[in-house]
Image: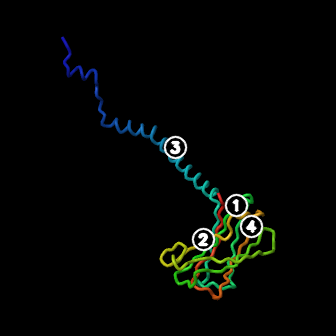
Amino acid sequence: MGIRRNNFRRLIYPIPNTKNLIPVLLSNTIQKNYYPIMNSIKLSINFFFITLALYSCTRTGVFEKNVPIPAHEWQSAYEPKIEFDLNDTTAVYNVYIVLRHNNEYAYNNLWVKAKVKEPGSQEWKSQQYELPLANNNKGWLGTGMDDIFEHRILIQPQTRFTKAGKYEYMVQQIMRDDPLLHVFNVGLRIEKVQ
C-alpha cells in the first residue's frame, strides 16, 4: 500500500513545460530590475562627466588664444590683437606669451613688445620682453613635434588685474630682422594661480 517512488515525485514536484516560460520570466525580470538600474547608472555617469567638465572649466581658470602669422613671416608692423574678459579681480594670475616656430628659426631668443589696454581706458601700456627659445647646451627649450616647437614663456608672474571687463593685448616683434622668418603663431595664455 504505498505510492511508487516515480509517482510520488510527480505528485510532489510537478514539472511544467518550461521551454517557453523561462524566456518570459527572464525578460520580465530584466525589464523590471535590470533596465531601471542601468538607466540610473547611465544617468549617474552622464551627470558625473558633465559635472566634472563644468568643474574643470571653472576651476582651472585658463584662457589661451593663438594668432597665426601670415606666411610665417612676422612683419614688425603686424601686431596681433588678443581680447579677453576678466571678471575675478581678487584672483592672482600668471601671464604667458605662447610662440610656435620651426627648426629654421635663426635665433636663440625673440624680443617682443607687449601692449595692454585695460577696460574703459584708451591708453596702451607697453613693456619689452626677451623670450628665451634655445640655448647652446639643450637646443630648443620648448616642446617639439617634428620640426615645430612651442614655447609658453612666463612674462608676468603673480599678476593681479585691478579692473573687471574686456582687456586688449597686442604683441609686436622688435627684432632686427623685418620680417622675422619661420614664426608660425603668437598668443597669450592666462592661468589663474590656485
Q: Nearer the viewer, mark 3 or mark 4?
A: 4
**Residue 14 or residue 150, whichever sits in front:** 150
Residue at which label 3 appears: 40
Q: Secondary structure at mark 3?
A: helix
Q: Residue at x 51, y 77 (%)?
A: 137
Q: Which label belongs to residue 118?
A: none
* Alpha carbon separation for disc pair 2 and 4: 23 Å
Q: Nearer the viewer, mark 4 or mark 1?
A: 1
Q: Nearer the viewer, mark 2 or mark 4?
A: 2
Q: Residues within 10 Å of mark 3 (few under 14, many from 20)?
A: few
Image location (x, y in percent) of residue 169: 71, 73
Q: Earlier in the sequence, mark 1 or mark 2?
A: 1
Image location (x, y in percent) of residue 107: 58, 83
Q: Secondary structure at mark 1?
A: loop
Question: In which quadrant of the rendered view does residue 18 lie?
Answer: top left
The residue type indicated by label 2 comes to Arg
Q: Earlier in the sequence, mark 3 or mark 1?
A: 3
Q: Earlier in the sequence, mark 2 or mark 3?
A: 3
* Alpha carbon separation for disc pair 3 and 1: 41 Å
Q: Secondary structure at mark 2?
A: strand
Image location (x, y in percent) of residue 182: 57, 83
Image location (x, y in percent) of residue 131: 63, 76
Residue at which label 4 appears: 166
Q: Earlier in the sequence, mark 2 or mark 4?
A: 2
* Alpha carbon separation for disc pair 4 and 1: 17 Å
Q: Nearer the viewer, mark 2 or mark 3?
A: 2
